[in-house]
Amino acid sequence: MSLAVNTTRSNALRTLAALGMLAVGFGTLGCPSGRCWVRLQTIGPDGQPTSDECLVATCPKNASFNDAIQGCACKENFVTLNGACIALADANKQCGAGSQYQNGACVAIRCPAGQIMNAANGSCESRAQSDALVAKSEGKDLKAGQTIGCPAGFTYTLNGTDGACVPNDAVCGLGTRYANGKCEAISCPAGQVFDLQQNVCTKLATGSDQQTFSVALKLKAEMGPDFCAPHAKNPSEFGVAPGQTKIVRVGVTINVPGNDISQAQLAALTTTDANGQALPASYAGVAAIQRQVNDQVLGGIKALGDKSTAQLAA
């Protein structure tokens, strides 16, 4: 993942001008649409089936084959997030502060009129008071009737007492993308992730008669633009001052011992600048990336369960 950050002093806030993603490059085999590999039928005295269920399908952990949709669906008490089926509480945890799980995606919590979401703690705060604090943190005072805003194509975000203008397509949460002037949920069923290049949902299963999934493809989906969103809103956490430009690159390697996805481990995590130099561990943004990789990326991979096609993904 590559995160390009360019900030300038404008209206007493930091402005994020560019966000880029370097996708994880892996090719995977697709699975035929809606495939049940082994079915169990019970035949009645009249020779007609009295029951018919799928026993073996290419579905992730906590999911089963659904005949109605001819595909995988999460079982009761589990929800779909980025291809995996997890408990609602875990989904909300992965969504992070300021967002909540809704219909397969992490949706920004809406604040009442006159308030704004503070991404630092996930609470709605007075817009007028927060504007004043942001301006004060930059050594300026707002006059009566003045507010802090952003140019067209940017969204104003608040983190603590830091304000930022972030490109609209870089503010969307996990499981969403910016389209039609807003963040929209990507509706992929269980066992599938969204392929940005092909603009389609892609199966994680390999198409064999085993429940074997591509950790590489799952990792690629986890490291999409929505991974960058919380960090794009906080350029100051990476030591970026107004007027400076910094590129932050994040590399993730996942080890899957014995191809058992439930045992997946974070083998390596690097957070470097454009020259490959490691960013100081003292940066709050570096620690935030570490938490996100552990809680969201690795947690989402392990939630698939079953077997991996390979023991290493990077």
Image (tube, helix red, strand yellow):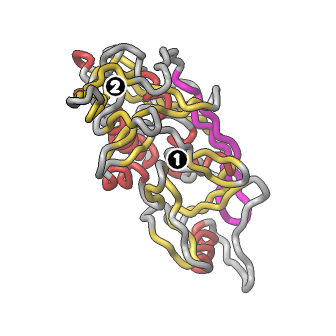
Residue type (three-letter) at the residue carrying disc 2: Ala
Taking the spot 64% from the left edge, 27% from the top edge, the residue there is 197
173 left or right, relative to 67: right
99 shown above or below 184: below
Residue 296 % position (x, y): 38, 42
Taking the spot 61% from the left edge, 38% from the top edge, the residue there is 246
67 shown above or below 92: above
> In this orientation, does residue 215 appear?
no
* Residue 80, quarter of picture: top left
Quadrant occupied by the C terminus: top left
Residue 53 % position (x, y): 29, 32
Q: Total number of numbered labels?
A: 2
Taking the spot 68% from the left edge, 49% from the top edge, the residue there is 167
Residue type (three-letter) at the residue carrying disc 1: His
Residue 231: assigned label: 1
In the image, 71 versus 46, the foreground residue is 46
Residue 132 % position (x, y): 61, 76
Circle 1 SS class: helix
Q: Which residue lies furthest to the right in this view?
A: 152
Per the rendered image, the range of residues in magenta is 1-24
Residue 70 % position (x, y): 45, 32
The CA distance from mark 1 to mark 2 is 38 Å
Q: Mark 2 points at which residue?
A: 57
| Magenta stretch holds residue 57 | no
Circle 2 SS class: strand
Q: Which residue lies furthest to the front in this view?
A: 46
In the image, 35 versus 178, the foreground residue is 35
In the image, 40 versus 146, the foreground residue is 40
